[in-house]
Image: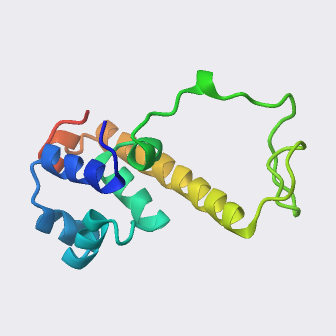
Amino acid sequence: MQSTIYERIEQLIKQSGMTKKAFGEKLNISAGNLGDWRRGKSTPSTHKLIEIAAFFSVSLDWLMTGKEWRPEEVKEAESRYFFEAAGQSDCQKPELSEKEQTFLREYMEFIDYRRKQDSDRGRRDRSGGASNESRNGRADT
């Protein structure tokens, strides 16, 4: 397991056979930003993490923490989750901070993005479009 977000990104770049320069050009990431991430001076934005995870078809959980999400580790309350104007995610928690609400909205956008991407990929596959391997130059993992 890699210890930093940058190390996991670097691992994905190497596994894909890309250069860091090609990766940066593909996702509009400057060499300066990559250098700052490597040195720990900064980290990718939430939106950029979502783009990187989608680009490499890895989970956002793994990219951010190095661990896959395990549903058996989640301890849910008896109530159903919901969002109301107060910004609560369940009945046992106080209001979410603005930062927490923003993060949840961005994560929900990521889920919608991945669903659309999966749906578009399924339509292309059914219509005889190029396979992922021929489009990306690599096999899906």
| Figure quadrant of residue 103 | bottom right
The residue shown at (41%, 41%) is 62
Q: Position of residue 133 (x, y in %)?
A: 16, 40
In-front residue for pair 92/84 = 92
Could you tell me which quadrant the C terminus lies in? top left
Residue 73 visible, this angle: yes
Q: Position of residue 22 (x, y in %)?
A: 13, 65
The residue shown at (43%, 35%) is 67
The residue shown at (44%, 44%) is 65
The residue shown at (22%, 42%) is 132
Residue 134 visible, this angle: no
Q: Position of residue 31 (x, y in %)?
A: 19, 75
Q: Is 18 located above or below residue 66 in the figure?
A: below
Compared across the picture, whether 107 is left or right of 100 comes to left
Compared across the picture, whether 76 is left or right of 24 comes to right
| Figure quadrant of residue 105 | bottom right
